[in-house]
Structure formats: C-alpha cells, structure tokens
C-alpha cells in the first residue's frame, strides 16, 4: 500500500472537474463531493465531514481551499495510516 504517480494524476483530474478555470482553489462546500469522488487511496467516502475537519485544511478568504493544501493533507493522512499499520502488524 502506498501512493503511486498515477494516484496524483487522478487527484489532479478530479480536482480539475471542481476547478475548471484552474485557479488552484475550490470552495469548502465542494470538499465533501470532491473527496468522495477521488479514487483510492485518496478517496474519503461520504459521510466525510468529520474526516474533512480532521484534515485541518487552511481556509482562505471567501471559503477557498488550495489544491496543494488538500493534496498534502491527504498524503499525510495516508502515510500516517501506512505507518500505523506497519507498526501494529510488522
């Protein structure tokens, strides 16, 4: 289990559907649908509001969230899960 280059490509493809003008931002209200739409390993299935809050994403003026902040938080979340599984089940 890990993250492959194609996982990042899929992330950007889904992000582009929610950010068609390539501003690198989406509104916080779109996060539940966006994260639910992502393929594994980044997918955060609905209901996901609590998991989104746990990502501690910085919200800019106007309720906007930056693409790299989301990608960093999802990567960190996934790598943390991998580390915990490895420690618990070597």
Image: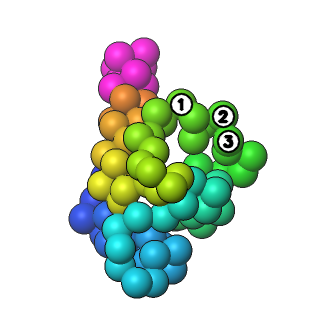
Q: Residue at x 35, y 17 (%)?
A: 87
Closest to the observer: 5 or 75? 75
Q: Position of residue 81 (x, y in %)?
A: 42, 31
Under circle 3, the secondary element is helix
Secondary structure of the residue carrying numbered label 2: helix
Which of 10 and 29 lies nearest the eye of the viewer? 29
| Residue pointed to by mark 2 | 50
Q: What secondary structure characterizes most of the magenta part?
A: helix
* Contact (Cβ within 8 Å) of mark 3 with mark 2: yes
Residue 88 in the image, given as x and y percentages of width and height = 42, 15
Q: Which mark is residue 54?
A: 1
Q: Which residue is mark 3?
A: 49
Quadrant the N terminus occupies = top left
Precedes in sequence: disc 1 or disc 3: 3
The residue stretch that appears in magenta: 83-90
Using residue 80 as the reference point, say whether residue 29 is left or right of it.
Answer: right
Q: Nearer the viewer, residue 47 or 31?
A: 31
Residue ID at (37%, 29%): 80
Looking at the rendering, in which quadrant would you find the C terminus?
A: top left
Tag 2 near tag 1, CB within 8 Å: yes
Secondary structure of the residue carrying numbered label 1: helix
Where 42 sits versus 80, above or below? below
Residue projecting furthest to the bottom:
21
């Amino acid at each position: 289990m890990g993250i492959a280059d194609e996982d990042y490509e899929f992330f950007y493809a889904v992000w582009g559907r929610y950010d068609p003008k390539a501003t690198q931002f989406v509104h916080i209200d779109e996060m539940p649908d966006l994260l639910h739409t992502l393929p594994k390993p980044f997918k955060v299935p609905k209901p996901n509001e609590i998991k989104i809050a746990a990502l501690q994403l910085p919200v800019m003026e106007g309720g906007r969230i930056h693409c790299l902040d989301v990608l960093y938080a999802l990567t960190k979340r996934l790598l943390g899960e991998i580390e915990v599984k490895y420690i618990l089940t070597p």
